Image (cartoon, rainbow, N blue to C red):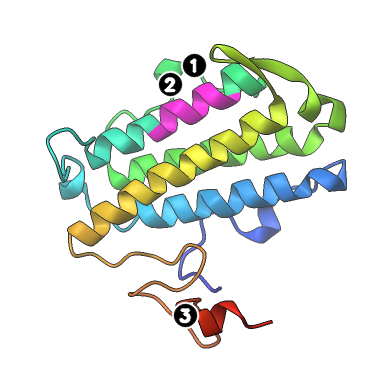
Amino acid sequence: MNYPWIAIPESSIPRAVNPIFQHLIDTYVSESNKVASTWKQFTDADLEYKPHVRSSSVGQILSHQLLSERRFFGEFLGTPEPAPDQVLPAALTIDSATNRFVELVVARLGFFARQQESWWMEIVPFFDVQRQRIWVFWRRVLHTAHHRTQLTVFLRLLGRDVPATYGPTADVSWTGADPTNSAAAAGRR
């Protein structure tokens, strides 16, 4: 897939000291690029938008994403992180939140790249249970995908284009895209 905008280019991805863990770093960057691309589809006028009274607003989801990544990575994985009161931009805008998100992701990459197997496999506290760091890492990636999905639904409800994440969308396609929308497509090899 070719994206019109990439926050963290492939050339900026550090190499893991243990190649078996490169996929963690590559996936974290890929998912983060998708988050940043989704955020950039909103405008500052959308920050208060929420589709239901019990929903979080766009701005609340952006803030939560920044703060919860800081907590997951800092508290549960031990990455060097800014103080909690230094995570959010002084003024929350789409650009300031997106820029801060990318800045925090990039700052974590070298740390993850330096970690050996014993670090990834170590059991650490995670809320009220114990889990391997690698499990906590993947749980964070899934949590991030959850919030990105919330926001893609918000985009659709606002009548905006939904960016491609894992393949074409109703709004974005390209030559060679091969969506699996039929039994015949699912049976291709």
**Residue 71 drawn at (x, y percent):** 51, 21
Q: Amino acid at mark 2?
A: Gln
* Label 3 neighbour load within 10 Å: few <14, some 14-19, many 20+: few
Q: Are marks 3 and 1 in contact (CB under 8 Å)?
A: no
Q: Amino acid at mark 3?
A: Ser
Q: Measured along the vertical axis of the image, is residue 156 above or below residue 100? A: below
- Along the line of sight, which residue is nearer the eye, 7 or 122? 122
**Pointer 3 residue:** 182
Q: Tag on residue 83?
A: 1
Question: What residue span does the magenta drawing correspond to?
Answer: 65-73
Q: Tag on residue 188?
A: none
Query: Which residue corresponds to the image point at 52% horizontal and 64% vertical from the top-left?
Result: 166
- Along the line of sight, which residue is nearer the eye, 143 or 17? 143
Q: Are marks 2 and 1 in contact (CB under 8 Å)?
A: yes
Q: Main secondary structure of the magenta part?
A: helix
Q: Measured along the vertical axis of the image, is residue 79 above or below residue 162? A: above
Visible residue check, residue 178? no
Q: Secondary structure at mark 1?
A: loop
* Viewer-nearest of discs 3 and 1: 3
Q: Quadrant of the N terminus?
A: bottom right
3 or 2: tag closer to the N-terminus: 2
3 or 1: tag closer to the N-terminus: 1
Number of numbered discs overlaid on the protein picture: 3
**Residue 125 drawn at (x, y percent):** 64, 13
Mark pair 3, 1: CA separation: 49 Å
**Residue 129 drawn at (x, y percent):** 60, 14
Image-quadrant location for residue 9: bottom right
Q: Amino acid at mark 1?
A: Ala
Q: Is residue 38 magenta?
A: no
